[in-house]
Amino acid sequence: MPTINKLTAKQIVTLPLGLHSDGGNLYLSVRPGGSRQWVMRYRFGGRQRELGLGGAGSHALTLAAARTAAEEIRSQIRQGVDPLAKREADVKVLRIPTFREAMDDFIKRSESTWKSKKSAPQWRASLDTHAAALMKRPVDQIDTSDVIAVLDPIWSRLPETAKRVRGRIEAILSMAKTCGFRSGENPAAWRDNLKNVFPAKPKLVRGHFKAMDHDEIPAFMTQLRATDSMSALALEWIILTVLRPGVGVSARWSEIDRKSGTWTIKAERMKSRKEAALVGEDHVVPLCDRALDLLDRVEALRLTNKGDELLFPSQKLKPLSLTALEHCRERMGVYVTTHGFRATFRTWASSATFHEVELAEKALGHLVGDETERAYNRGHLLEKRRRLMADWADHLAGTLTPKKNPFVIQGSAIPRQVVDEMRRRWAR
């Protein structure tokens, strides 16, 4: 009698590329790229047949479940039934789901294993936006040309989004194949398929975000301010205050002090929260006149009357998503990252003004100096930073000129020592 149950649970996740027998016609197929599939290989009517059972792994078909399915198939063979022909016949009487139905089913099955509650909404939003053409199509009718048509408009323009959309389409169609709703190769697969059509995305260096040149930002701000929406107001707030986007969209009214013209964020909400907590340092943002005026516009759109609600809530009264900011920029035809505006500010402060570098770093919420310096210098340099942020607001409005403000560098050929001397003089 042939030996069965050869493999172990540990082996199914560690075995190398190739076909590995568990006995009784059950095999684990490890494919290029690392995917693992259970297959039954058997002879019926003098022909070699292969029947896929599904993916292998902790969140797919376990070893025990694969063996149970294999035994059912062996039972059909003993009864004179070809399992592959039976599956094909069963599929013909099934109603093939649309891509949207398959997407909903995939998300429902997967969201309990996802770490973040935001994952399911992000999957839906990205596919609804960029794969709308697939939604009403039966999953067995989607081919590679359909996937290419979805990815073509965003592959170069939104590379990170395109990468996610492709992977999500591939996962949904893989599930549809496992459930018997389609056959053949996955049209959204990268290796030996879409890799031959689209150029590989360059690897990003951590910490680098696509940013706008500081000379171009006044024209962008004019365009942004003509867009009266919650996402546009939130984006302007983030640009004016130069804090990280996640902190910007989660701002609350209770953190705003209009009398002193400040916005105070607790240390634990900042990226450097661990270090800042050591010295008890909350981050205080001096608000320029434009930021205070923006608060009036935001208040007119308030969705509730609670005292501590968000400045920029979504319709579900949760923080406005960063995806909403991305869509706001896309509608304007501007393809930089929200985080990149911080780099724009930092470059402007260093190359186009005499303001001290430490002020710009402090404005960005970066920790300045070593632990000892931070412990003994807990000041926010608030008034100096207020002047810096007022100059930034004037630059965004296109009204900052050397004639009006001595902090502005006149020309780009000024020797570095002159710039440093001017900064020291105006810092006094």
Image (cartoon, rainbow, N blue to C red):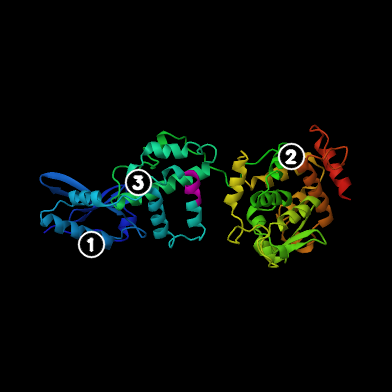
Apparent side of residue 95 relative to residue 45 in the rendered image (left or right): right
Tag in front: 1 or 3 = 3
Which kind of residue does numbered mark 1 sit on? Thr
Q: Does residue 11 belong to the magenta stretch?
A: no
Residue at left offset 59%, top offset 58%:
315
Magenta residues span: 125-130
Distance in Å between CA atoms under marks 2 and 3: 47 Å
Where 372 sits versus 331, above or below? below
Residue 233, x across and y down, in percent: 69, 51
With 343 as the anchor, is 134 left or right in this view?
A: left
* Of the two numbered discs 2 and 3 in the rendering, the one whose residue sits closer to the viewer: 3
Residue tagged 1: 68
Residue flagged by tag 2: what amino acid is it?
Answer: Pro
Instruction: Give the residue type that dot 3 points to.
Output: Pro
Badge nearest the viewer, 2 or 1: 2
Q: Label 2: which residue?
A: 218
Residue 393 position, x and y percent, is: 78, 46
Lower position in the chain sequence, tag 2 or tag 1: 1
Report whether residue 371 is seen: yes
Tell me which secondary structure the magenta stretch mostly adopts: helix
- Residue 57: name its quadrant: bottom left
* Kind of element beneath mark 2: helix
Mark found first going from the N terminus, 1 or 3 = 1
Is 129 colored magenta in this rendering? yes
Residue identifier under label 3:
138
Which one is earlier in the sequence, the residue at label 2 or at label 3? 3
